[in-house]
Amino acid sequence: MDVVRTAIGLMSGTSMDGIDVALIRTDGRGFIERGPFLGMPYDAEFRGRLKRALELARPLRDRNERPGELREIEQELTLRHATAVTAFLERFGLAANGVDVLGFHGQTVLH
């Protein structure tokens, strides 16, 4: 068997209901072991801010633009993901140095 790595994946999709955190162990080929998972719901106020981000992003033509309020929402979202990972590790008694890779795609506001 190849080297087994531990990965945490984060998902916050278009439903804007919260952050899902899940752990797998895999060799990237044939071995995969599903680990614990956790859902961290957004409060109504932040869900509203995410909806506002969609409005702010609509007129943008350059996907690298992050004007004012959109940048603030993005930063808050990133911090909420970091908090979700910390809560996940604590809840399941896992050490951060035991995780080899973290997958975090952010929140889609512009296609």
Image (cartoon, helix red, strand yellow):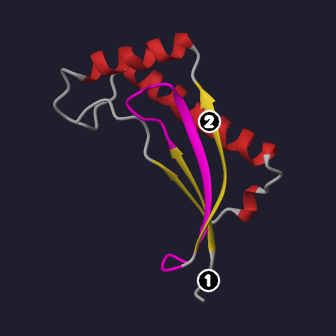
Amino acid type, label 2? Gly
At horizontal 74% and vertical 56% (from top left) the residue drawn is 96
**Between marks 2 and 1 in the image, the one whose residue lies nearer the viewer:** 2
* Pointers 2 and 1 in contact (C-beta within 8 Å): no
**Split into 4 quadrants, where in the image is the C terminus?**
top left
From this view, report whether residue 34 is shown above or below residue 66.
Answer: below
Q: Which of 34 and 75 is in front in this view?
A: 34
Residue 45: mark: none
Residue 3: mark: 1
Q: Element under label 1?
A: loop
Q: Position of residue 26 (x, y in %)?
A: 58, 72
From this view, report whether residue 102 is shown above or below residue 78.
Answer: below
**Mark 2 closeness class: few <14, some 14–19, many ≥20 residues within 10 Å:** some
* Residue bearing the label numbered 2: 39
From this view, report whether residue 98 is shown above or below residue 75.
Answer: below
Magenta residues, start to end: 11-30
Real-space Cα distance between discs 2 and 1? 29 Å
**Split into 4 quadrants, where in the image is the N terminus?**
bottom right
Q: Where is residue 93 in the image (x, y as percent from the top left)?
A: 83, 51
At horizontal 46% and vertical 22% (from top left) the residue drawn is 73
Magenta run includes residue 18: yes
Magenta run includes residue 17: yes
**Mark 1 closeness class: few <14, some 14–19, many ≥20 residues within 10 Å:** few
Amino acid type, label 1? Val
Q: Where is residue 90 in the image (x, y as percent from the top left)?
A: 80, 44
